[in-house]
Image (cartoon, rainbow, N blue to C red):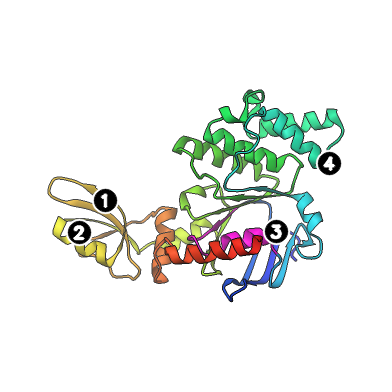
Amino acid sequence: MTEEAIIDIRHLSHTFKGGFKALDDVNLNFGVGVFGLLGPNGAGKSTLMRILCTLLPPSFGEVRVCGHDVTKDPMAIRSQLGYLPQEFGAWRSHRVEEVLDTLAQLSGMLDKPSRREQVTRVLEDVGLADVADRKVKKLSGGMLRRLGVAQALIHGPKVIVVDEPTVGLDPEERIRFRNVMTSLGRDRTILLSTHIVADLGGACKEIALLDGGQIIYQGTPSGLVSAAVGHVFQVSVSEMEFANIENDYEVVSTSVGSGSIAVRGVSHTDQLPDGAEIVQEPSLEESYMAFMAARGRSGLASQAEEHIEDNAVNEASQ
C-alpha cells in the first residue's frame, strides 16, 4: 500500500454462486479528495461498494481501507468509514438534531457535551444548521440527502462512500450537494458511485470507469475529455439525414430549427458525418459516451446486465 492510498484495492475479483463474475482483477487506489466510480448499471459498482463497506467478503484479492484489511479487520474499517446508501429516509418523525444525536450515541459518543458539539459541527458542514429542529418528514429531497451525509459523518470517518449521490434531486439541489462533497473532500476520502456522469461534476480529482467487472479507465476527468476530442461532433441535417445519424452514431442532443436538425453526437471511430464539425471542448458526459462507444458499448447497460448483478447482490445478502 502506498503512503497516500486511503483505499487500496489489488487484484480484486468476486464471483457469486452460480458462476457470475461481478468483479475481475480490479486494481484501484484513492487518497484524500473526491473520487468518482462511474459505470453503467450492472457494471459491478454495487458489489465493489459492498466489499469496501465490509458487507461482502471478496472471492480473491486484497482490499485495504485506512490500512486495514476488509476481511481480517472489518470493525476497524467500519469505525473509519461512513456510508450513504441510495435510499435514506428513516427516522421520519424525529427532528434532524435528534437523529444525529441518537446515531452519535450508537457510534459510542457517550459524553453529552462533546456529542452535542459534534452534532452542531456536522449540521453546519452539510448546511442543515438552520433546520436542526425540523422533522425529517418535512425536509426537501436535497435536505434529506444532506442529512444522509450528516449521518455518515457523525462519527468522524476518514472515508465516505456515497451510492448514486444525487438520485431524485432537482438541478439546484444537485449543485448544492456537489458543493458539499467538494468541501468535505478537502481532508477526507470521498468515493461517489454512480451511473450518471453529471453527478460527478468538476469536483472529482480522479474517476474510475467500471464496465463488465473491470476497470477500463482511471485518471483525471480532463484526461478523459482530452481523449474524446475528435470523436464528438456537431452537425445540421435534414429529417431524412437524421435517421442515418441515429443509426450510425450516438446522439447526445438535438435542436430542431427551420428545416433542419442541429445534432450533437459521438462517433466510435474517427469517421464523422459529412459536414460535421469537431467539438473541441466536449463535456464529461460526451467524453464518457465516446469512451464507451469506442469499446463498442453505449453509455447504458442492458436490462439483462442490471438484472444479473441485482440478483447476485440480493443472493449475497441472504
Q: Which mark is residue 254?
A: 1
Give the mark nearest the N terminus, 4 or 2. 4
Query: Going 12% across and 49% down the picture, which residue do you hit?
Result: 259
Give the mark nearest the N terminus, 3 or 1. 3
Residue 145 on image: x %, y %: 58, 39
Give the mark nearest the N terminus, 1 or 4. 4
- Distance, label 3 to label 2, CA atoms, is 48 Å
Provide the residue designation for mark 3: 55
Residue 74 on image: x %, y %: 78, 59
In magenta stretch: residue 196: no
Q: Do callouts 3 and 2 mark residues in contact (Cβ within 8 Å)?
A: no
Q: Do callouts 1 and 2 mark residues in contact (Cβ within 8 Å)?
A: yes
What residue span does the magenta drawing correspond to?
A: 35-56
Vertical side of 93 occupied by 264: above or below: below
- Distance, label 1 to label 4, CA atoms, is 54 Å
Answer left or right for 85 relative to 288.
right
Secondary element at image label 4: loop
Task: Give, as a three-letter code, the residue at label 1.
Answer: Thr
Give the mark nearest the N terminus, 1 or 2. 2
Name, please, the residue furthest toward the bottom: 19
Q: Which mark is residue 242?
A: 2
User: From the viewer's perspective, is the residue at label 3 or at label 1 nearer?
Assistant: 3
Q: Do callouts 4 and 2 mark residues in contact (Cβ within 8 Å)?
A: no
Asked if residue 201 can be seen in this view, the reply is no
Query: Going 64% across and 29% down the picture, which residue do you hit?
Result: 93
Query: Going 86% across and 35% down the picture, which residue do you hit?
Result: 110
Foreground residue among 6 and 304: 304
Residue 104 on image: x %, y %: 77, 37
